[in-house]
Image: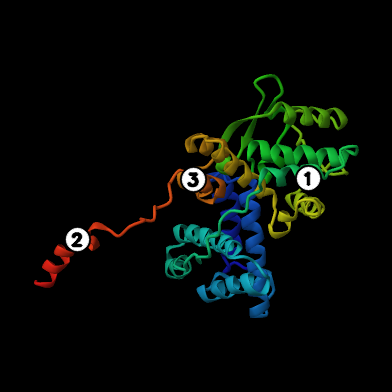
Amino acid sequence: MTKNNRFPHLLRAFFYEWLAEQRNASIHTVRSYRDAWRLFLRFVAQRSGKKVAMITLIDLTAGEVIAFLGHAEHERGGTIGTRNCRLAAIRSFFNFVATRDPGLIAQCVEILNIPIKRGPVSEPCYLDPIEVTAILAQPDRSTLEGMRDHALLSLLYNSGARIQEALDLCPDAIRFESPSCVRLTGKGRKERICPLWPETVMLLKKLLERQPRAPDQQLFVNRYGEPLSASGVRFKLAAYVRAAAETTPTLRDKHVTPHAFRHATAVHLISAGIDVTVIRSWLGHVSLDTTNHYARANLETKRKALEQVSAPETPGHQPSWKRDASVLAWLDTL
């Protein structure tokens, strides 16, 4: 870092002062932005032939950002959503720089004007009740690992929690006495309370009996006692889905992730006739538009709605305007 290179100072201030202190961003947001900038700086360094430590703000042009986004999407095989997340991290930094150094506003505006890329909006992948049952039957509950996986997947389906919300869960956030519930902390540190089935409470109790955790320790851990990662859950779930597909063939055509349990919760609540405002609170959605997306995806609800609409009747005789020859003759005279 040279005296004329302000970039390292600004980047440090962005993470420590802006994100952590002023914005009070969650650790997940900070890590996501950190990973985006780590990839971006390595990409720019490789293209410019410089070391990362020698990169300046002048090197971080809008052209470099666009090239990096293309690299992230096409060469690294990322999705459009991942591409947009990388762009959000970069734009957030240059929005911060514009307030600190007005002389760089022109460069910042060019980067801030890079648009978010639109992608296809597909229907959410959700699981039918029989598919959920098939997957939950796969973990070997005689082992600690199988007991943990079964309890985690059951919690995901019961509460509709995002995977990270479930993995951050500590025993002191669970009410085991009736009425049983769990307190989840979601996006933007918003808390919500979700009821728990007695079966889910029993699974969590048995897991804690076999693997005790302090009230403020994360409940779901790996074999080394470290908090379980989302990638680890996805890996285990993929194995369970493959095994469940042997008896439930419909699973072979579905891309099942931990988030699919959240989709299943929403769709099944809608099928049960629960009001969407209740489901929005249950899942922690900011907008009803997000919740309504599940209503559109629920094929069973559509089928029931169709059954309530009678099919158009096919007339067994000619309509009156065809039977009345005098009317036709009159029309011919016009």
Between 19 and 236, the residue placed more toward the observer is 236
Q: Tell me where residue 181 appears, x and y as whole percent.
A: 65, 27
Which picture quadrant has residue 1?
A: bottom right
Tell which circle, 2 or 3, labels the residue nearer the N-terminal end: 3
Q: Which amino acid lies under the numbered mark 2 shown in the image of this protein?
A: Asp
Residue drawn at (63%, 62%), measured in percent from left and top?
36
Q: Residues within 10 Å of mark 1 (few under 14, many from 20)?
A: some
Residue drawn at (58%, 44%), measured in percent from left and top?
267
Label 2 vs label 3: CA separation?
A: 36 Å
Q: Which amino acid lies under the numbered mark 1 shown in the image of this protein?
A: Leu
Per the rendering, the mark at residue 228 is: 1
Q: Tell me where residue 144 appears, x and y as whole percent.
A: 88, 38
Q: Nearer the viewer, mark 2 or mark 1?
A: 2
In the picture of the structure, the residue carrying the numbered disc 2 is 324
Between 124 and 311, the residue placed more toward the observer is 311
Q: Is residue 305 left or right of residue 39?
A: left
In the picture of the structure, the residue carrying the numbered disc 3 is 307
Q: Is residue 236 left or right of residue 186?
A: right
Depicted 308 relative to depicted 60: above or below = above
Q: Nearer the viewer, mark 2 or mark 3?
A: 2
